[in-house]
Image (cartoon, rainbow, N blue to C red):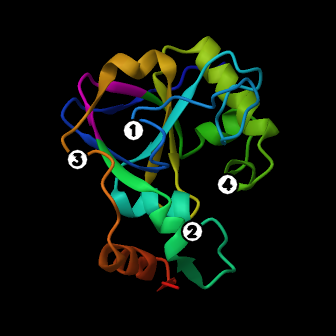
Amino acid sequence: MTVTVLRRIAAGATLHRIHRPFHDAVFFGPTGATPQGRFDAPDGSFKVLYAARALETAFGETLVRSPHIAFVLSTAVNARVRSELLVTKALRLFPLIDGSVSKLGLSFTDLHGDAYAKTWAVSAQIHDNTPADGILYTSRFYNQRCVALFGRAASSIAESPNMKLPISPADAAKLAEKFGKIYVEP
């Protein structure tokens, strides 16, 4: 692997998650060995926590999964909560936001697609061959930064006082509007 300059998120920064209430906000998954998320270990050998630098980005990554659907359902929003995580020690992240994507044999189509075999393999390569705490990547839906943190970064993040908060209908409507969607209540 060629040398890549790692990006940093400083201690004191906040990360945002929208997640199921039965998962802790600091949740490295998946629970089994079968990968599910974009940067999960292909063999289950390490776990990953997904977060965003902004609440809007977390909303897009979690609740605006189908761009062709013009609405966000209240049932989907009500099945989740929002949490803020605090970065307690600077995070070193492998950037998949520029030419480093091509260095690893990926295109942005691969990175933003739903066929995860390539991103799983690249995640394992980064995990196994660099000191990175995780991966810095761009949201598919909001052109802002997200992170996929490896389990080895667990000591670098902590819960904030803002944990497992419901997303109000007013907030959901504002967030949905940022994506050109309509928040729909039954």
Viewer-side label of 1, 4: 1
Magenta segment boundaries in residue numbering: 85-92
151 horizontally vs 163: left or right:
right
* Mark 4 or 2, nearer chain start: 2
Q: Tell me the distance, in whole angstroms, between the alpha carbons under discs 3 and 4.
A: 29 Å
Q: Is residue 3 above or below residue 57?
A: above
Residue 82 placement, left or right of 128 = left
Identify the amino acid type marked 4.
His
Asked if the magenta segment contains residue 91, the reply would be: yes
Answer few, some or many: residues within 10 Å of disc 1's Cα (few below 14, many 20 plus, some between 14 and 19): many
Inspect the image, locate mark 3, and give the three-letter code of the amino acid beneath it.
Answer: Asn
Mark 2 Cα shell of 10 Å, populated few (<14), some (14-19), many (≥20): many
Q: Earlier in the sequence, mark 3 or mark 1?
A: 1
**Residue closer to the observer: 135 or 35:** 35
Question: Which of pointers 2 and 1 indicates the residue nearer the eye?
Answer: 1
Q: Residue 47's x, y, as percent? A: 58, 24
The image's mark for residue 64 is 2
What separation in Å lies between label 4 and label 2 (alpha carbons)? 14 Å
Give the residue number, with chain letter if any, for mark 3: 162
Work out how far the residue at label 2 is from the one at label 1, CA to CA, in angstroms: 20 Å
Mark 4 = which residue? 112
Identify the residue at horizontal 68%, vertical 34% (top origin): 103
Q: Amino acid at mark 1?
A: Ala
Q: Is residue 49 magenta?
A: no
Give coordinates of residue 99: x percent, y percent. Answer: 60, 42
Q: Which residue is mark 1?
A: 25
